[in-house]
Image (cartoon, coloured by chain):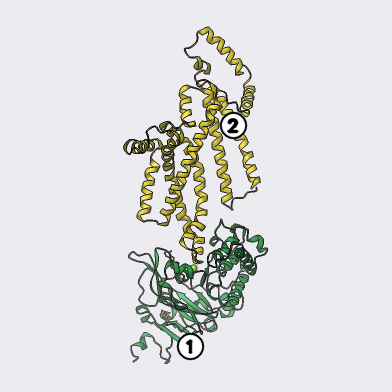
Amino acid sequence: MAQYVVRRLLLLVPVVIGILLITFLMKALIPTDAVTAMYQGQLSEKEAAQAIATLRAKYHLDLPWYQQFFIYVGDLMQGDFGESIRLRKPVIDEIGYRYVNTILLTALSLVIALVLGLTTGILAAARRNTWLDVTATTVGLFGISMPAFFFGLLLILVFSVWLRILPVVPHGWMAIILPAFALGIIEAAPLSQVARSNMIDVMRRDYILAARARGQSEMALIFRHALPNALIVVLTVVGLQIGNLLGGAFIVETIFSWHGIGELAVNAIQWRDFALTQAIILISAATYLIINLVADIMYAWLDPRVELVS
Amino acid sequence: MAAGIRSPHTLLDIKGLRTQFGSGRNPVNAVQGIDLQIGAGEILGLVGESGSGKSVLALSILRLIQSPGRIIGGSILFDGKDVLAMSNRELSGWRGRDIGIIFQQPQSCLNPVRRIGWQVAEPLRQQEKLSRKAAWDKAVTLLRSVGIPAPEEKALAYPHQLSGGQAQRVMIAVALALRPRLLIADEPTTALDVTIQAQILELLRDSCRDFGTSLMLVTHDLGVVARLADRVAVMYAGRIVEEGPVAPMLTAPSHPYARGLLDAAPRLGQMGGLRLRDIPGSIPDLSQPMPGCAFAPRCELRANLGLSACLGELPPFIPISEHHAARCWALPQADGIYSTPMTMGTRA
Ligand SMILES: Nc1ncnc2c1ncn2[C@@H]1O[C@H](COP(=O)(O)OP(=O)(O)OP(=O)(O)O)[C@@H](O)[C@H]1O
Ligand code: SF4
Ligand SMILES: [Mg+2]
């Protein structure tokens, strides 16, 4: 197992270098000059020229690109993600707590999605073609076709405006409830479908018949025999979905004013705050990589047929 | 009624069992009125062409027929208990403990994500309520007794790490873990390498003998029947057409179908590899009503004798000797008169 993990980590090295290169080169693709954006309309032309010269020196813009790249990576390794031109503070200070917020939101919505998706999926499979199954499938279809932001607005309308259970602009821990459910319920729908179809598929296998023939109860068949098999496929879907959740978080955070990376990203782009945008992209990509790695390792751990040593 | 051997104790007693697939206009009558007994400690060989309903019968006995199939009639008594009246709860208490089954494809019958030891130990933990440790130790012992080499290590392996023969040994270990009184083996060696078929069959026979377990052995292999079975039943189109002790069944079968299938006496004596003979033609469509003998369209005897009742009326079981009977109009009745249509009308 350890060997497998090491091998997977080594495979990540070229990917990480690629991501670093892309975020580094993004500078070249940005239409607005960062320095201009920084002092837009605040300085006279002469002052501006001088500021630009200072900044060019400060940001090593006169060096060849590969040297700039090494400096960039070196800074990152020391936790220096640059300075936000808009917020006038190190990017890392702003991103740190917001990252924690986003992880909290994503994790909570993942838990909601898993609990909802797995229970409805397993139930629907166990009671196939009953009203329960039909209801779950129909509701699931709505879930799949509805974008998270729209569902989020619906939740605000129902819980904050009509029922007045939650404030429209909630504070503290309460603020996480609606966005977490908005994301979680939406992601529960595809999870439920995958769980259902895989459970149905697995319950048809010979080893389920054989276990039933040995006197295992239906409960035991579902939970001890079928579920571990069905979960293998469900897990790969979950891995992909965390990507969706992170993406969905960008929009849902903005709607619900949850101070996470997503909300920051939308602002950073509007502000043309380059260092901030760059850091957000970098950290999102890294998170995505780590999640995929964990999903792969869990997959190998769950499915004994995956060869761990090559 | 078949003249089954009345051993001192009849363990399984099936009467008029009917199993159907589909419920539309033309359901498939896979099992249509089967009478069969299996005595304690007895080995019954069940033979018949592909599609004759052997597997459906086996699954019906354990109430394992899944929708769209269902048992639509008859009775199954296991040691006096009415199997068809059992609740789901009673069924899971009965299966595994009193009756077991092993199938043709051992690899696909093992759960791919569970260790071998776990699967052998499961009935011991769940039904026998042994502790985790005790069940595991017993599982290792069981694996050793079915001839798995290095059972301590193999218990930790997963099914894909076993060969087909090893997998079938494991299935036998699991099925016999609780020492059931009847084991049904549905073509247990068909999917295996010829070289290990004999070993597996010997293992089955010896294990059953050791535990006093009765065995219903479904097979296409006459050599297997000759070596293992006490009694043979021949199935055709969802019915048993002939049944009797192994010796007369193999040397002098009476039913034209059984004769075609089993007529292999000169080739007997080897274990394994002796297939049933092919008979020209094929099994009738089981979704069509069959008032007469289902074998009639393929029966040379009928053609030669020009019997007409064969098509019109189902032949009854006609005793040949005390424990031997067949369903055929062309058989001599006990009084020596043929129960053929020609004589039927004139008989008192
Ligand atoms: N799940 C099912 N749905 C519909 N028909 C079925 C089903 N299972 C079996 N049958 C039908 O029942 C009949 C008997 O099948 P069965 O599998 O019992 O034959 P068999 O004697 O075991 O043949 P083989 O020697 O090939 O195993 C066949 O006509 C088959 O089409
Ligand atoms: S009953 Fe008639 S058709 Fe059927 S096996 Fe006997 S002779 Fe042949
Ligand atoms: Mg079969």
Residue A169, x across and y down, in percent:
39, 32
The tag on residue B321 is 1
Q: Amino acid at mark 2?
A: Gly
Q: Residues within 10 Å of mark 2 (few under 14, many from 20)?
A: few
SS at badge 1: strand
Q: In the image, which lettered chain appears yellow? A: A
Protein chain holding label 2: A
Residue A276, x across and y down, in percent:
52, 25
Q: Is residue B159 above or below residue A171?
A: below
Q: Residues within 10 Å of mark 1 (few under 14, many from 20)?
A: few
Q: Is residue B149 above or below residue B36?
A: above
Please say whether residue B281 is visible from this viewpoint: no
To which residue does mark 2 refer?
A: A18
Taking the spot 36% from the left edge, 52% from the top edge, the residue there is A134
Taking the spot 46% from the left edge, 54% from the top edge, the residue there is A199
The quarter of the picture where residue B246 lies is bottom right
Distance, label 2 to label 1, CA atoms, is 86 Å
Q: In the image, which lettered chain appears green? A: B
